[in-house]
Structures are given as structure tokens and as C-alpha cells.
Amino acid sequence: MSEQMNTVISGDESDIHDEPHIRGRRITVSHIHALVEERGLNAQTVADRFDLPISDVYHALAYYHDHPEEMRAVKERRQEVHEAAESDPRTITGPDDLPEA
């Protein structure tokens, strides 16, 4: 019997993210969820866009729904970081924040 490697790395186990992401890639579970379930993109379209097997997209979506507390904590951390960045005048959050050339 072959051993299956987990497709999704949790944020606790990750060296490159503080949130769950696709193994060997910098694509987060939150991003996959946003594209498929919030923006309504087809899962195959997302897989093609990121050169992923379709199964990785579905594994990410399953992980999102199987770990609601972890995903809620990820969303809260992102919101805190965003609010901190908005309140710090030294932080560039978009093109309007760039100094005039």
C-alpha cells in the first residue's frame, strides 16, 4: 500500500507561511478558498492558473472546511496585520502610498 503525502501543510508546520498552504508551493489555503468559493472561479481554472493538480485545489478546500478554528484565526491575524499597516504611515499598502517621483 502506498503512503500518501499530505497536500496541505498547516501553519504550525510551515517554514514559509504562518498559515496553511499547498506543500511545496507558496499558495495558501485561504487564497484557494477565496478564488473558488468567494470569487466563484471554477476549481479547474484555479488549478490551471497555478499549475496544480485539481486534487490539490480540492484538498485545500477540504482543509479549509475541516479546520474552521484555524482558518478563523488566520483571518483574524491577517485583519490585525492589515489594520496595523493602515495605521503606520511608513507602510506602503498600495500605489497611493508611494512617494512622488
Image (cartoon, rainbow, N blue to C red):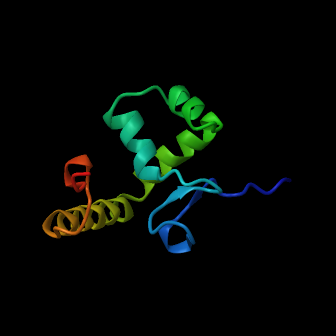
* Residue found at x 36% / y 36%: 37
Asked where in the image residue 84 lies, by quadrant, the reply is bottom left
Viewer-nearest residue: 50 or 69:
50
* Residue found at x 16% / y 67%: 89
Name the outermost residue toward the right.
Answer: 1
* Residue found at x 25% / y 56%: 93
Left or right, residue 65 beside residue 78 = right
Residue 40 on image: x %, y %: 36, 28
* Residue found at x 48% / y 53%: 28
Please, is residue 50 above or below residue 98 in the view? above
Please, is residue 88 above or below residue 1 in the view? below
Name the outermost residue toward the front.
Answer: 101
Viewer-nearest residue: 1 or 68:
68
Asked where in the image residue 41 lies, by quadrant, the reply is top left
Q: How many marks?
A: 0
Asked where in the image residue 80 lies, by quadrant, the reply is bottom left
Viewer-nearest residue: 95 or 79:
95
Residue 55 on image: x %, y %: 62, 39
Residue 31 on image: x %, y %: 42, 47
